[in-house]
Amino acid sequence: MKKLITIVLLLMVSEAHSAEIFGAELSAYVGGQKVTDASESVQIGLTLKWPYVEVDMSHGIQRVSWRVEQEPTWEMDEWQSGSAFGIRGYPFRNATTIRPLITWVHLSDITRGVPFNDKEEPTSDYFGIGVTFVWKRFELDVSTGVLGRECAMFRCSANSRTSESQIQLRGYFWK
């Protein structure tokens, strides 16, 4: 584990530069997020960055504290495979170290369900506002908002929305 951490840190401080795709800067990161006591994840992902918008796609492991209605044997609070898709909006164009943030994150698992298998997985949508702190190759988002459980994009199951806070850290090794 120490060797893996050392390799990741060396990659982050190296001079690796990102590519450009669709007019956006493409970057790769290792990160994690925690939504109050509802869920947490550790991911490796890609970010497309435009001046006012960033799009994230990542995969890793997640742990949630609720049971999927369709799968009553789901093991809560155990690390399972997880995927995330998110959009971050920055209403003001500035290159400072603190930026206002509007965010949406959908957390599920692209390796479960049809066509891979017939298992259900916990899904959630988080909408929030907050700030992003930037320091060299690291970004930290702190936000407050609403978490909906058992979501298919924006449609969540009845009475599943709760007020939550989210913290998300990304360390870019290719930026």
Image: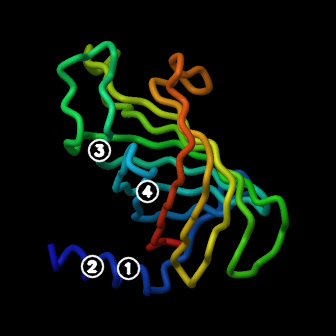
In the drawing, does residue 22 fall left or right of residue 62? right
Q: Which residue is found at the position 71% from the left and 53% from the top?
A: 102
Q: Which residue is mark 4?
A: 33
In the drawing, does residue 109 fall left or right of residue 154? left
Q: Which residue is mark 1?
A: 11
Question: Which numbered tag is attached to residue 142?
Answer: none
Q: CA distance from mark 1 to mark 4?
A: 21 Å
Q: Which residue is mark 2?
A: 7
Dot 3 falls on a residue whose secondary structure is strand
In the drawing, does residue 135 fall left or right of residue 90? left
Q: Amino acid at mark 1?
A: Leu
Q: CA distance from mark 4 to mark 2?
A: 21 Å
Could you classify mark 4 by the number of other residues whose Cα lies within 10 Å: few (under 14), some (14-19), or many (20 or more)?
Answer: some
Nearest to viewer (mark 2 / mark 3): 3
Dot 4 falls on a residue whose secondary structure is strand
Q: CA distance from mark 3 to mark 4?
A: 11 Å
Nearest to viewer (mark 4 / mark 2): 4
For the residues labelled 3 and 1, say whether their Cβ atoms are less than 8 Å apart: no
Quadrant position of the C terminus in the picture = bottom right
Q: CA distance from mark 2 to mark 1?
A: 6 Å
Q: CA distance from mark 3 to mark 1?
A: 27 Å
Q: Amino acid at mark 4?
A: Gln
Q: Residue 63, image x and y in percent? A: 29, 44
